[in-house]
């Protein structure tokens, strides 16, 4: 094994990063003329169809620009280097049919000559027969999984834990899969995970195909490197200087404005589409081990604009149904628009609402101020509540809030869990243990057996 820093010198002397990281790879420099992203995706699709895939790169379930483009470019780079078995295939972590909900990604892809339908999903999607679904369950011993833009598998994908072989991420280090990811483990708090991916291209001298596409994710995540957001780091600025000279027929400002407009154009979406467009599940535990499921959507509107568009009653009804489908004790919505942030909280009962109120108390610097609250259901078993809080310090995004919420919940005790209905969504991750078909067959056999027994009694 060759020391990681020997090939990636720019990762040295960073403030937050895992240690003793190594990479084994060839010293050969890739060809000067890069393969196009469209051609790489076509090769990836063929590898899936032929079942020759050896390694996949998977983004997180929120699948924003940083995650989707990060998985694409990290897979592209690793497919040229001798780090993991090849072919290396990029995956998006949402159904293909949900991709049109992300207008910024669609615009970035099309602008660079890439069809959105050419991306490969790890989710089966009956609504889109064009989707190329990777049957990971049939290849459990052959597939290595590299995580990008997250370093902890979601609760529905934990069966892949032993497959994780690498991590490139800019979130809090969860200290997982450490022994398995010695070949590639880069966890550094920067503005964009794609800055870390781009660093790999810069350090290894890999020509960047469609640099405007890779740059798009960094522009959006850093808000055009705006220092007011407190997200941009020296790493991001260094990568800006690396990629910006490669732009053709556009500038950073023009490209950011176009992407931001496409991302913000969401008024035609339904409420469920708004909720799942940028959504993540978190599974926390209290001090006494009680599991607390927290879901968090990010929506680029303020709560008042949502009420005006859909009606407050319709919004709350849809949100309640979504909480039930996701089986969450707490459903959070981060509203963000016009340089303002609000946090909406749908709590199944007052005990779980108190978890969030305690979080507010423990983090006064963020400055949450109650705007509205209404009790939706009040029974002896539950008191479902919807509340909206204005956020004074708008630099705290979901990325920064989620670990603080986890820390607060982990100190709580004696939490009474609200009832949570079973999910009704027919979309299910391919890594689920029990399929819907097995349930249907079991029910069918039970009914058939009951019918036979009744006939015997009648005779």
Image (cartoon, rainbow, N blue to C red):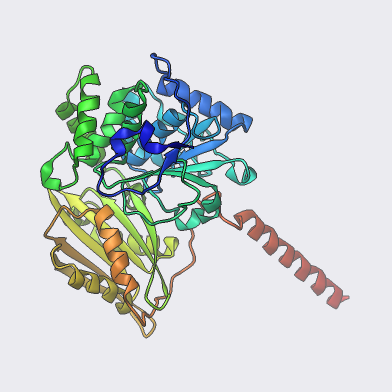
In the drawing, does residue 448 fall left or right of residue 239? right
What x and y, as percent, mark residue 358? Answer: 23, 74
What x and y, as percent, mark residue 133? Answer: 54, 38
In the drawing, does residue 159 fall left or right of residue 114? right
Q: Tell me if I can see residue 262 in this picture.
A: no
Q: Is residue 248 above or below residue 335?
A: above
What x and y, as percent, mark residue 80? Answer: 46, 25
Q: Is residue 452 above or below residue 161?
A: below
Image point (32%, 58%), residue name: 296
- The quarter holding residue 258 reads top left
Q: In this view, does 166 lie above or below 85?
A: below
Q: Tell me if I can see residue 217 in this picture.
A: yes
Q: Furthest-right residue in view? A: 459
Which residue occupies the foreground of this view, 237 or 214? 237
Count of marks placed on residues: 0
Which residue occupies the foreground of this view, 61 or 284? 284
Image point (47%, 53%), residue name: 177
What x and y, as percent, mark residue 192? Answer: 27, 41
Image point (15%, 48%), residue name: 230
Q: Furthest-bottom residue in view? A: 380
Q: In which quadrant of the rendered image does the C terminus lie?
A: bottom right
Image point (59%, 41%), residue name: 135
Which residue occupies the foreground of this view, 14 or 30? 14
In the drawing, does residue 416 fall left or right of residue 360? right
């Amino acid at each position: 094994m060759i020391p990681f820093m020997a090939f990636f010198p720019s990762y040295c002397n960073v403030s937050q990063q895992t240690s003793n990281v190594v990479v084994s790879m060839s010293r050969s420099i890739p060809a000067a003329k890069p393969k196009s992203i469209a051609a790489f995706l076509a090769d990836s699709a063929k590898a899936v169809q032929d079942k020759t895939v050896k390694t996949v790169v998977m983004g997180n379930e929120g699948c924003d620009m940083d995650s989707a483009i990060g998985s694409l470019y990290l897979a592209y780079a690793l497919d040229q280097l001798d780090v993991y078995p090849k072919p290396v295939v990029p995956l998006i972590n949402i159904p293909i049919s949900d991709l049109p909900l992300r207008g910024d990604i669609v615009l970035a892809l099309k602008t660079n000559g890439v069809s959105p339908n050419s991306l490969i999903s790890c989710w089966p999607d009956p609504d889109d027969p064009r989707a190329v679904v990777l049957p990971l369950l049939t290849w459990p011993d052959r597939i290595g999984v590299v995580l990008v833009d997250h370093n902890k598998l979601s609760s529905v994908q934990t069966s892949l834990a032993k497959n994780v072989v690498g991590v490139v991420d800019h979130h809090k280090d969860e200290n997982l899969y450490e022994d398995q990811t010695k070949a590639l483990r880069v966890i550094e708090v920067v503005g964009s995970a794609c800055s870390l991916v781009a660093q790999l291209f810069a350090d290894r001298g890999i020509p960047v195909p469609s640099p405007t596409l890779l740059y798009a994710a960094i522009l959006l995540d850093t808000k055009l490197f705006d220092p007011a957001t407190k997200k941009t780091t020296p790493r991001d600025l260094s990568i800006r200087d690396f990629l910006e000279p490669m732009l053709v027929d556009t500038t950073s400002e023009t490209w950011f404005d176009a992407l931001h407009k496409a991302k913000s154009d969401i008024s035609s979406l339904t409420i469920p589409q708004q909720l799942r467009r940028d959504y993540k599940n978190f599974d926390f535990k209290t001090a006494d081990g009680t599991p607390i499921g927290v879901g968090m959507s990010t929506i680029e509107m303020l709560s008042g604009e949502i009420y005006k568009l859909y009606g407050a009653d319709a919004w709350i009804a849809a949100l309640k149904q979504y909480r039930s489908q996701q089986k969450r004790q707490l459903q959070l919505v981060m509203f963000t628009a016009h340089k303002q942030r609000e946090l909406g909280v749908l709590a199944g009962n007052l005990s779980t609402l108190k978890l969030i109120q305690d979080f507010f108390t423990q983090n006064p610097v963020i400055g949450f101020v109650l705007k509205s609250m209404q009790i939706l259901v009040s029974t002896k078993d539950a008191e479902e509540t919807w509340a909206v809080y204005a956020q004074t310090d708008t630099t705290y995004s979901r990325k920064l809030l989620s670990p603080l919420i986890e820390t607060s919940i982990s100190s709580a005790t004696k939490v009474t869990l609200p009832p949570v209905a079973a999910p009704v969504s027919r979309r299910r991750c391919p890594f689920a243990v029990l399929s819907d078909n097995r349930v249907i067959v079991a029910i069918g056999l039970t009914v058939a057996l009951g019918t036979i027994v009744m006939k015997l009694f009648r005779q």
